[in-house]
Image (cartoon, rainbow, N blue to C red):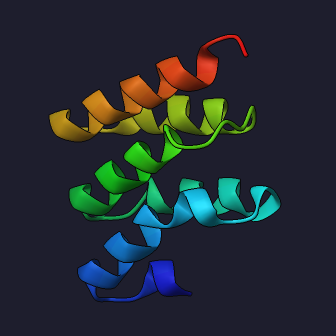
């Protein structure tokens, strides 16, 4: 619900807090944030992807990277992809 709020600032706050979400609920929330109309929210969500390891995030990040048009978001998504793809 908060990721659907019309206020970009609130969605930014929620995206920044995604690493604190329980693992089971984090991936769908990240997926929604990475599809936000605001590049700022998408960038923040991509940065959040670097903060917690979750195997299920890799396909979400790759799908977002394939459709992303904003260069500054692409950079963050690529970094998140590299971190998620690294052996643990």
Residue closest to the far top: 87
**Left or right of 56: which side holds 49?**
left
Above or below, 30 relative to 51: below
Q: How many numbered badges does the structure rendering display?
A: 0
Above or below, 20 relative to 88: below
Residue at 49%, 67% in the rendered image: 17
Residue at 57%, 56% in the rendered image: 19
**Left or right of 30: which side holds 57?**
right
Examine the rendering and report whether any part of residue 66 can be seen: no
Which x, y percent locates residue 33?
A: 46, 61
Q: Which image quadrant for residue 13?
A: bottom left
Residue closest to the far left: 71
The N terminus sits in image quarter? bottom right
Which x, y percent locates residue 14?
A: 45, 74
Residue at 44%, 65% in the rendered image: 15
Residue at 26%, 79% in the rendered image: 8
The C terminus sits in image quarter? top right
Q: Which image quadrant for residue 75?
A: top left
Which x, y percent locates residue 22?
A: 75, 64
Examine the rendering and report whether any part of residue 79 can be seen: yes
Above or below, 29 relative to 79: below
Which x, y percent locates residue 83?
A: 53, 23
């Amino acid at each position: 619900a908060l990721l659907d709020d019309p206020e970009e600032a609130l969605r930014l706050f929620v995206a920044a807090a995604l690493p604190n979400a329980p693992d089971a609920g984090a991936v769908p929330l990240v997926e929604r944030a990475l599809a936000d109309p605001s590049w700022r929210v998408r960038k923040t969500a991509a940065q959040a992807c670097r903060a917690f390891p979750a195997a299920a995030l890799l396909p979400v990040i790759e799908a977002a990277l394939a459709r992303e048009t904003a260069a500054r978001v692409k950079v963050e998504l690529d970094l998140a992809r590299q971190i998620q793809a690294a052996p643990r």
